[in-house]
Amino acid sequence: MEGMLGLLKIRVKRGIDLAIRDSMSCDPYVVKVKTRSVKRNCNPEWNEELTLSIIDPNVPITLTVFDKDTFTVDDQMGQADIDIKPYIEAMQMELENLPNGCAVKKVQPSRTNCLADESIIEWNHGKMTQDMRLRLKNVERGEVEISIQWIDVQMF
């Protein structure tokens, strides 16, 4: 697939019950496009938006959570893959004039995604949105709550 399909806005809302990597707490931040670090908080609230260009919707977007350290290398606190294929499929339905909050598609947690709970793709204010709670991999515990929204719908 050549060229860019469009832009995806990811709102990294918060972390839930993140693993402690220092003696008492953690200073977590998320990387794909970096969020700010939240000091001494295993349940941080970031509420930051990241915009990524999408070339291949079959390639999951990996978010990695790190614990910021001052004098040593930052510790990895897990990662989660965002599977955007169900979202892209819902976008391609070309639905319009739906009432706000109308559920277009429900995505269930499975072995092939990082969803911690059912995720609903819905129509809000003329845009398709999807909220997700992602379970972090390669760590004993922790989740990241995000929301995604396509920026340029005209490219479909």
Image (tube, rainbow, N blue to C red):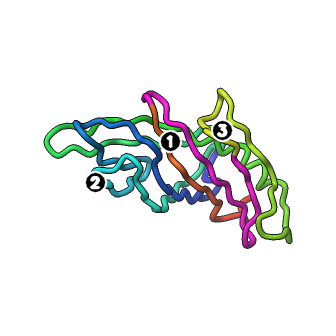
Q: Position of residue 156 (x, y in %)?
A: 75, 58
Q: Magenta segment range? A: 119-140
| Label 3: how many Cα within 10 Å (few below 14, some 14–19, many 20+) | few
Q: Secondary structure at mark 3?
A: loop
- State whether the magenta stretch is mostly helix, strand or loop: strand
Q: Position of residue 86 (x, y in %)?
A: 73, 44
Residue under numbered circle 2: 39
Q: Position of residue 51 (x, y in %)?
A: 51, 59
Q: Upstream in the sequence, badge 3 or badge 2?
A: 2
What is the CA distance from the residue labelled 1 to the residue labelled 3? Answer: 23 Å
Position above or below: 102 against 113: below
Residue under numbered circle 3: 58
Q: The residue under label 3 is which amino acid type? A: Asn
Position above or below: 147 against 78: below
Residue under numbered circle 1: 143
Residue drawn at x 62%, y 39% is 115
Contact, CB < 8 Å: mark 2 with mark 1? Answer: no
Q: Upstream in the sequence, badge 1 or badge 3?
A: 3
Which numbered mark, 1 or 3, is in the foreground of this view? 1
| Label 2: how many Cα within 10 Å (few below 14, some 14–19, many 20+) | some
